[in-house]
Each structure stands twice: as structure tokens, then as C-alpha cells.
Amino acid sequence: MKSGAQILIEGLKEQGVDVIFGYPGGVVLPIYDELYDADIRHILVRHEQAAIHAADGYARATGKVGVCLATSGPGACNLVTGLATAYMDSIPVVALTGQVPTGLLGNDAFQESDITGITMPVTKHNFLVQDVKDLKRIIREAFYIANTGRKGPVLIDIPKDVSTTKIPDEDGPDQQIKLRGYKPTYQGHGKQIQKAVELIEAAKRPIIYAGGGVISSEASKELVEFAERTCMPVTTTLMGLGCIPADHPLNLGMLGMHGTEYANYAITESDLLFSIGVRFDDRVTGNLATFAPNAKIIHMDIDPAEIGKNKPVDIPIVGDAKNILTDLLKRIPATCSHPEWSEKVQNWKKNHPLRFKEDGKLRPQYVIRRLAETLGDKGVIVSEVGQNQMWTAQYYPFSHPRQWITSGGLGTMGFGFPAAMGAQVAVPDQPVFVIAGDGSFQMNIQELGTIAQYQIPVKIVILNNQFLGMVRQWQELFYERRYSYTELPEVQFEHIAKAYGIEAETVRSIPDIDSAFKRALNCNGPYLLDIRVEREENVFPMVPAGAAISEMIVGQHTEHEEE
Amino acid sequence: MNRHIFSVLVEDSPGVLSRVTGLFSRRGFNIESLAVGTCEQPDTSRITIVVSGNDVQIEQVKKQLNKLIEVIKVLDITDLEHVERELALIKVKAEPGEVRSAIMQVAGIFRAKIIDVGTDSLMIEVTGDSSKIAAIEDLMSPYGIIEMVRTGKIALQRGAGTACSGR
């Protein structure tokens, strides 16, 4: 005989789960009791939101499913932001929640919440286990759903009596995965791929627009080979950074609201937009009518609902990016080239580089550049949300997939620090840095307790400007500098870190940066750097919301030669 | 804006209807009519949904429905040969005498049934397409409709084709 809690732990082990981020509570006590001797590491976070962000960071760093555990009611509700974050970015996470016993369901019992109802819009699927006999099958289905097709978060809600009820230890007849309504398409349609080949061969000004789908399908090698063979420049979304090395001659960096000038010009003038694992997000496209206005569009995605959702498409290809690119590579001759277009793109790249003012003041872009030079191509860089995120996306030269972790779709402040914690647990041998703003860091600052307790050696870099910087930037540009509630008081983060027993220092000038990074790297445990940067630095280029992406504000620091 | 009829085969499990309707509300698709019941396949229900929208919206409705794990098949039967029906129960004021016989006569013309007789009311059961139900409603309203309920539209493809065969 086995209890539901035992079945759960065995099911997790069967799925290869080696770490759970969680927070105990009344109705998950039977599960915690089993975890006490289980061969699974449990990290006790300080807030359930951090548990799911950490599971998410673990998943992004490895490609494996991240797992978190919370109790019912408030514990479960605290997962919602993290579920929505993982859902928007298609990250495989399985969230386990406790629930009041089945007999009390619907009675407004203590710490009861209808978490499957609450999380329906922000999960790929969710389950309420009503009978312990279904538990084993549901665990298998949950992991399968989370990590196949378009990946995403799945929640399993487990009533307390399901955890405690004992049943005979055997696989019932219906333990196999039988999901009649779930059959993801992995192979692209041959005829559609052939049509794509014809468009690619006919194109004069083609460009690749690559996104997070390339990372999650592990298709970056195929992408680079395809780009090289067709001489197509590649621009990536925020989520796609790292799928082509930053120093690759065909790489144009990020496009969109804070994209590079050259990527946005190239998109606007292209005659063929080859879109891979992207969703034409409004932060990428700006005004849809003027996004790649003269281009034929090929869109490949594993989720058919993304194709044509925002922009009509000429050739839809449903399937897995790696499979489709492999198929395309077999059909594409090695002779495609468009020298005039290539030259034009390279000239944009040369004449409109990303720039910031280098006048001896401590600017965030400089900090990021120095960090990149310190780390080389090692390590994982996680960001919070806001200016810190955009500067990192712009200035950090990512060289490989899964080197960059950020909340793209939902833009969740407070994501970065716990996600970095999860990533560091996943890849203990690599340095993991989180680049944060003073605003977003304070959204999950309590996790200093967790990294201190487990000596998770995350290095925290706070670009401290005492503002909610991105909001302040919008107020400066569009609200006549009326800084309504965006100023934050000075905080001595060094003291806070030290109170938790974490080594920390405050950095105030350029000459101190390199040595501070070295001390952080050489420290075996966690380390916090509170870097006091220029307070009113802006992120440029910037496309005002709703404008064409070719209509960028390039900023006061980016004066450049005319073409 | 075109009106589309979707015949949606789903797993017969708790919460499925909520997933389907939740999808419509959060993506801003307007449901005109919705009817649910079990069908010929075990552990399966059929939902008939009528929704209006432009081509892009209708395509999205279909794709988003298909993404739900418990949705087995989505068939847009609008352009297929099909039969649509709706059932309505209409409770109408009917004093004994001339009024009552006039109402019964109209019901007879519509092949509707009188299924309940009160001291001064009648309940009429009528099935048909929307225009037929609208017509009898119009004719009854001068007498005074006390209460009325409609099932929402159900529809099936004509011939041997089914939602599952996709023919």
C-alpha cells in the first residue's frame, strides 16, 4: 500500500526531478513528510512567488521541467504571477499545490481557494486530483503536457486526503498517457517548406526574425547554418537572444521597441520576413501596419494559433523549429546571396551602432559591458525587468542559447533574482549573475534569506539609480518630466545583504568596477554589488508605443554620422 | 462579421465548459449561443457554439479551442450542409375562452405543443431554427409572455459525415 504523497514523490523521481522549490503549509504536510527522506533536494524559499520563478529559472537554464510546491489558498495564489510569467514565455514548469480535503471542497474552508479556476487562463493545463487512483497518471500527463508542443506551465492541485489515502501499489490499467485532444505537430508540411524555399530563393532583401521558439526547440545550430547558407541577416527578439552569437557577422541584435537601429531598418526594408518561433508581439512590431510593410512573410511555429494572430502570413509552417530548419537545409542550395542587400545591412550596422556617452560617469551600459568582458562566454545572465533588462539585452554579447534568462512576455518585476537562484541551482558550476534595478530587486528581496541559507552563489548586480527607471524614462519623454511616484529613496543594499550574512559592497565609480566584479567572482558564496549609476540615464534607441519601428528616438547620446 | 457554428467534441470531465467559456471571455470572443450535452461517444460531450466575428477572429477561435487539452475536435459546420435546431418553452397568459383557443391555434400552425395548462396560462414547447422561434415569440407577445427559456442552438452536419471524420 502506498499513500498519495508517496505516489507523488515516486512520480516526480520517475520524471527525473532532482530539485523542488517550495514552501510548506497545513495541507501539504503529508507531502513534506515524504520529502523529509526523499532523494530530492528541496529549497525552502521565502515567498511562493519566488518558488515558481526559481523553478522557471531552472527550466530556462536547462530545458528541463522546473518544479515548485506550495500549500493551498494563499500559498497557491502566490504562484499566479509566476505561472503567468512562464505561460507568456512558454516555459515548462509543473506547479504542485495542496488543497483542502475533497470533503471540504467548495465550502470556503480555511485556506481554500479554487486554484484550478484561478489559474485556468495562465496555465497550459491544470488538474484537480479528485481520486488518488488518478494521481500517477496525472503526474505523467502534467510533465508530458508541460514539456511537449508549445511548452508551458501545468498545475496539479492535490487535496490533503488524496495525499494521505493509501492504495495498493500497482499500475492501474489507465496509467498510460492517453490525451485524445493533444497531438502537437512536430514535422513541418513538406509542400509548405518547398514553397518557403521558393520564396527564399526569389528574395532580394530577406531577413530572419528569430525568437524564443528557437531556444526551446534547441535549434540554434540549425538556425546559424541556415542563415550562413542563405546569407540572411538575423534579428532576434528579447527571448531569442543567444540563438546566434552576438559577434556573428549576420547578427543584427534585437529588434523592436529597444532594438538596434540596424535591425529595425532592415526589417522595414526587407522583402522577405522569415519568422521562427516568434509571436509578433507589440513590443516587437510597433505599429503593425508599418511592420515589414513590403515583405512576404513565412512564419514557422509549433503553435498554429500564433500564425496569423497579429499579422497575415504568406506561408504558414506548423512544426518544431529544429525539424523544419533541418528539412529546409536539405532543400536549400548553397548559392543564395544578395550582395547589395548584405552591403546595405552592414552599412547600417557600421553607421548606427549602439552607443552611450563615455564621459567618465558611471553608466549602466558600461557596467554591463565590463561584466561581459569579465565573464567572457561563461555563465548565465539573468535580468530583472525595466531599464536594467533592456540595457543587458542591448549590451551583453550573448554567445549561446540559455545564457540569457529574462521575463519577456509578462515583464515581471521581481522575476530575475529568484530565477537566478533557480538557474544557479540548475548549473552549479557556472557563474550566475542577476542584473537588477533597485526597484525590481526590492520586489523579491526576501530571497536573500534563501541564497544565504543554502549558499547559492548567485552574484547580484544592482544598477541603482533610485528610480523606477523605465517608468521615469517614459515620464521624461512623454509626460513632461512629471516624475509621478517613480522616485525611490536611497537604500543601503550592502547593509541589507550583510544582515543576511551575504558579502556585499557599494560601487560608486568607474575604476572600482573591474575589481568589484573580480571579488564577486572569486567569492564562493553569493555576493551583492550595489552599483550607483547615473540616475537619469535612458534606454535608446526607443520606438514610442504604437509608432513604426523605423521611427526611433535615438537619444542624446547616440549622435552618429549621416549615411 | 459572419456568424459561425462550431461543433466541438470535448472530454466529458469537470471544468471543461469553464475552460471553453473562459477562453471566449478572456480573448473577447462573443458567444451568441451555447449548448452542451453528452453525445454518442462515451466520456465525450458535444458543445455547439455560435459565435460572430470576422475571418481572422473566427480562425483564432478555432485555433484557440484546438489548443485546449480536453478539446478533441473542432468542426466549423457553417459552410457544410447542416441542420440547426433550438427548443423554446414559452409560458403565455391565456384566460380560458377565445384568447386561449386563438393561442392554441397559432401553436398548431407552428407545430408547437401545449405542454402545460394553468388556470390562466399555457406553456408552449416549440422547436425550430431561430427565425421560427422568433416568429412565434412575436405572435405570443401581445397575449403576454410570462416567462420564456431557450436551449441555445444545436446543430449537426447532414449525411453520414461526423465531427470526428471531419467530412
Image (cartoon, helix red, strand yellow):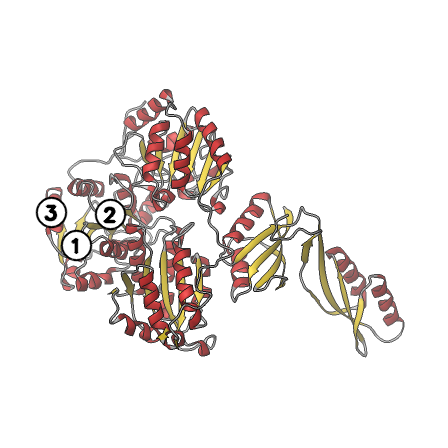
Mark 3 — residue?
A518
**Whole-percent x and y of residue A308?**
50, 41
Q: Position of residue A287 (x, y in %)?
A: 45, 38
> Is B80 in front, or is B140?
B80
Q: Amino acid at mark 2?
A: Ile
Q: Residue drawn 14% across and 57% down?
A: A525
Q: Quadrant of the N terminus of chain A?
A: bottom left
Residue that extends furthest to the right in the rendered view of this protein: B98
State whether discs 3 and 2 lie on one chain.
yes
Q: Position of residue A56 (x, y in %)?
A: 32, 55
In the displayed structure image, the side of residue B78 where residue A56 appears, left or right: left
Residue A122, compared with residue A194, is above or below; it is below
Chain of the residue that carries numbered disc 3 in the rendered image: A
Structural crowding at the residue carrying mark 2, measured as other residues with C-alpha within 10 Å and reported as few (<14), some (14–19) or many (≥20): many
Q: Residue at x 24, y 71 (%)?
A: A37
Q: What residue sits right under mark 2 in the picture?
A: A381
Q: Amino acid at mark 3?
A: Lys
Q: For the residue labelled by badge 3, is the local secondary structure a helix, a strand or a loop?
A: helix
Q: Is residue A101 above or below residue A9?
A: below
**Residue labelled with disc 1:** A528
Question: Marks 1 and 3, Cα distance to the nearest angstrom?
Answer: 12 Å
Quarter placement of the C terminus of chain A: top left
A428 vs B120: above or below: above
